[in-house]
Amino acid sequence: MIPMTQKTRNELWWLIISVDYNYSRISIADHELNGQTLTLWLEDKQDFKNTLDECLQLHIPVKHFTRLIKAENMNSYEGQRTHAKKKYVYSTRIAISEPMHWYNYDATPAEQQHARETLLKTILTQLVENEIFAYNYEFQ
């Protein structure tokens, strides 16, 4: 679960409402990755902004982005290995590299974009599911 402040949750809800709950209209206008934070600038695809200042900024700790890459198996592939002593072949997940090393150096631009979009989708899903759960819990 990716922690968010109440202010960020409210801003995301306004963005969701402004796109009429059509999440495919929410796009990542730009991104920036520094040592500890991934920043995403979000906007409505049907209402492009002139500057990034007009977009919604999301600051996500890199450790949460790393967990997502690992959980979604983005930095690994399904392969076969031979057991060292018993010499039988078995299927396993083979890691390409550590999640952030994979993202920065091994992933193609399309894979990097897919990772960022998966993160956004995860955040939106988490927001909606948590709010609906809280709403249902209040009225039971």
Image (tube, rainbow, N blue to C red):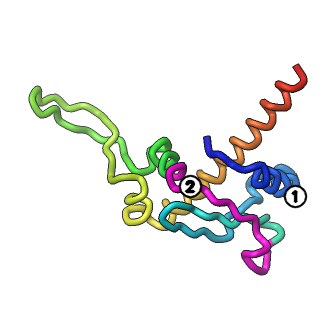
- From where the camera sits, is residue 98 visible? yes
Q: Outermost residue, left direction? A: 85
Identify which residue, 140 or 44, lies in the foreground. Answer: 140
| Residue 92 vertical position relative to residue 65 in the rendered view, above or below | above
Determine contact: label 2, label 1, CB under 8 Å.
no
First in sequence: mark 2 vs mark 1: 1
Question: At 50% across and 51% down in the image, what residue appears?
Answer: 63
Asked if the magenta segment contains residue 50, the reply would be yes
Q: Where in the figure is residue 3, as x and y percent of width and height? A: 65, 46
Give the x, y percent position of residue 34: 51, 68
Q: Which residues are magenta?
A: 48-65
Which amino acid type corresponds to the residue marked 2 in the rendered image? Answer: Pro
Q: Which quadrant of the figure contains the N terminus?
A: top right
Q: Amino acid at mark 1?
A: Ser
Residue under label 1: 18
Residue at 41% x, 53% y is: 99
Where does the image place residue 15, in percent across and percent down from the top left? 82, 57
Q: Residue furthest bottom?
A: 50
Q: Quadrant of residue 90?
A: top left
Farthest residue in the top direction?
Answer: 140
Q: Secondary structure at mark 1?
A: helix
Q: Is residue 55 left or right of residue 37?
A: right
On residue 61, the disc is 2
Image coords of residue 139 (percent x, y): 90, 24
30 left or right, relative to 47: left
C-alpha separation, residue under disc 2 versus residue under disc 1: 26 Å
Dot 2: element: strand
Q: How many marks?
A: 2
The answer to whether 46 is drawn above or below residue 116 in the figure is below
